[in-house]
Amino acid sequence: MPDFYVRVANRRLDPVTDLETTRAQIVDAVREGGDFVDFVDGARVISVLITPSTTVTVHPLAEAARTLRPVPVGPNGLDAVFPSFDAYEDYGV
């Protein structure tokens, strides 16, 4: 799994290839005056038209992880949400 994502026109897209290949594809598209570059959007691959005026930024996943907000835990913690594994020790017997 790549350790970066790309933001095009303020939309997060995941790369199809590694960092150097993705950068080369973007630069080539700009130098040619515009071309399509493939990215993953959710569960589908989409082609994005990259032109010299397209705003493209590359973000490492470490940066993306810092933007995540922690999930608040209730007063009983997470143990109250998940049953103990001991409750399933006879499962399938």
Image (cartoon, rainbow, N blue to C red):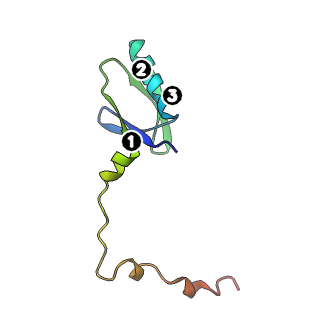
Residue at 47%, 33% in the rendered image: 19
Is 83 located above or below residue 43 in the figure? below
**Residue 15, horizontal then vertical, whole percent:** 47, 36
Q: Which residue is mark 2?
A: 27
Disc number placed over residue 91 in the picture, else none: none
**Residue 66, horizontal then vertical, whole percent:** 31, 52
State which quadrant residue 78 falls in.
Answer: bottom left
Quick check: marks 1 and 2 in contact, CB under 8 Å? no
Quick check: marks 3 and 2 in contact, CB under 8 Å? no
Q: Determine the secondary structure under disc 1.
A: strand
Which residue type carries mark 2? Val
How far is mark 1 from mark 2, CA to CA?
18 Å
Earlier in the chain: of badge 1 and badge 3, it is 3
Query: Label 1 neighbourhood size at 10 Å, few (<14), some (14-19), many (20+)?
Result: few
Q: Determine the secondary structure under disc 3.
A: helix
Disc number placed over residue 21 in the picture, else none: 3
Q: Which residue is mark 1?
A: 60
Horizontal side of 5 relative to 54 (left or right) equals: right
Which residue type carries mark 1? Pro
**Residue 33, horizontal then vertical, whole percent:** 38, 12
Residue at 62%, 86% in the rendered image: 89
How far is mark 3 from mark 2, CA to CA?
10 Å
Query: Label 2 neighbourhood size at 10 Å, few (<14), some (14-19), many (20+)?
Result: some
Is 93 located above or below residue 78 in the figure? below
Horizontal side of 92 relative to 61 (left or right) equals: right
Which residue type carries mark 3? Thr
Residue at 33%, 38% in the rendered image: 11
**Residue 88, horizontal then vertical, whole percent:** 59, 84
Earlier in the chain: of badge 3 and badge 2, it is 3
Residue at 39%, 17% in the rendered image: 30
How far is mark 1 from mark 3, CA to CA?
15 Å
